[in-house]
Amino acid sequence: MRAWKAALCGVLALFAALAAGHLVAGLIAVNASPYLAVGNGAIDLTPSPVKDFAVRTFGTHDKLVLLCGMAVVLVVVSALAGAASRRSVWPGAVVITLFGVVGVVAVAARPDLDTVALLAPVASLLAGVGVFVALHRAARPGMAAAATGTTRRTFLSTGAGVVVGSALAGVGGQLLAGSKDAASSRTAVGRLVPARTAPAIPAGADFAALGTPPFVTPNREFYRVDTALTVPQVRTEDWSLRLHGMVERERVYSYSDIRDRPLVERTITMTCVSNEVGGPYVSTANFVGVDLADLLDEAGVRPGAEQLFSTSVDGWTSGTPVAAALDRDRGAMLALGMNGEPLPLEHGFPARLVIPGLYGYVSATKWVTELEVTTWQARRAYWLQRGWGEQAPIKTQSRIDSPKGFATVGAGTVRVAGVAWAQHTGVAAVEVRVDNGPWQQATLSTEVNVDTWRMWHAELTVPPGSHQVSCRARDRSGYTQTQERAGTVPDGATGWHTISFTAK
Ligand SMILES: Nc1nc2c(c(=O)[nH]1)N[C@H]1C(S)=C(S)[C@@H](COP(=O)(O)O)O[C@H]1N2
Ligand SMILES: [Mo]
């Protein structure tokens, strides 16, 4: 048979396999889709430096890049496997089967999926092999020369049938997955009214008009970092939080158990450990929820407990020092809401942890469903297994937001503006300098609380030409940001943010 026909058999079999898996996954759990399971598996297996590189290079699009890359590899390999089957059905059938097995293994390995989820990759495997064999048969030239036209027609109509069937199955799977989504459950939550609201944000809390971000980050713009390829869909009615381990009384809370308690609101700046100097992974919100210490006190933490080990519905885990979770002065929260709304799905609906002063990977579990009080020895959380630090307080940092790097500005007086943060300690001062000149004090915005960022601006005099401007923050402990550059691994980047610009 012609090479193009053989290759097409491979590619169409791939489509059929992916679509069948997606359809069955739509009935069970969207993450059972073998394509997504392989993607999620790849994320968990990717070495930290590569993951760090992906986050740095592609930002929030890192997952889209992964999925597209996988698609290209799958199509190319399927086409090659098909082309290798010009004489015999075997090479292609073996490769398609191997793909299917990888899908089964990936779904079996997902911590968030149970055994029925295996039906999805099994459906993929059967559809892939079945379609490949059928198309291959239809494509084989007939015995007599006269039959060639018929063969081509049979092949094309079978192929078209596969394309239409796959499209229907794929779309059907997507619709089914959507019908079980959590969006309507979130809408049904309505307003979460705190009994204790956070103090109103004072007018001078940001210098947005001078180029800083707004003090409170709108939910849509709040940075997002997680390992989930598809946003976990958890309805409040299906959610519960189990608190167990080294406690006197194990507790299980439903959504209404939490929501019916007096809620508190706190303004908190969250930061990701993967934020490079000058990076975007820092945002501020008004979180609404309950004190984590209240829940822990109800359960009764036993002596010797060191770690609060939290687990997300998607299997991701995090370990927080118990002392930080119990410290009332720190105000660790189990949050249900963010900026006047229930948590957005991507930010952990129905419930997440937020603990001021600690990087997100040790404090901010989204879609949290289990809290185990334990020791550091007993459990190792997701990023600890991958070489990141156990203790991860947020490092004092500052960033220049305006001018942007490589901008051209008018010579003379140049306004520089940005943000600084030293959560749980407080920013005491920010200094700026041009071209290794003397450090100059920046004007700070009104402080909201020590757990939030603080904006700054400074007016510098610069002659025409290219220049570099750097900033550094000092916190209330007296510590001034070190110039020493450290990468994000294992516990957060250090160094001064420096940008270049041209004055004309
Ligand atoms: N379930 C889950 N929770 C998670 C993560 C994750 O990968 N999965 N990432 C953590 C990290 S590294 C950070 S910095 C914060 C980011 O929260 P955000 O996406 O709401 O900004 O969530 C934390 N909670
Ligand atoms: Mo993070």
Image (cartoon, grey):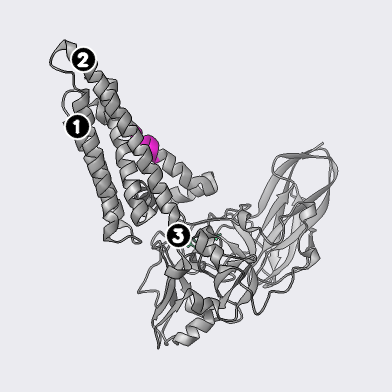
The disc label shown at residue 233, or none: 3
Residue type at numbered disc 3: Gln
> What's the residue at 67%, 67% (across, down)?
452
Single out the mark in the foreground, 2 or 1. Answer: 2
Which residues make up the magenta segment? 70-75
Residue type at numbered disc 1: Pro
> What's the residue at 17%, 23% (across, down)?
87
The disc label shown at residue 20, or none: none
Residue 118 located left or right of residue 437 = left
Q: Quadrant of the C terminus?
A: top right
Q: Which residue is mark 1?
A: 91
Please identify the quarter of the rendering in which residue 396 is found.
bottom right
Residue 91 located left or right of residue 495 = left
* Residue 100, position as x, y percentages in the image: 25, 44
Q: Earlier in the sequence, mark 2 or mark 1?
A: 1
Whether the magenta-drawn stretch holds residue 403 is answered as no
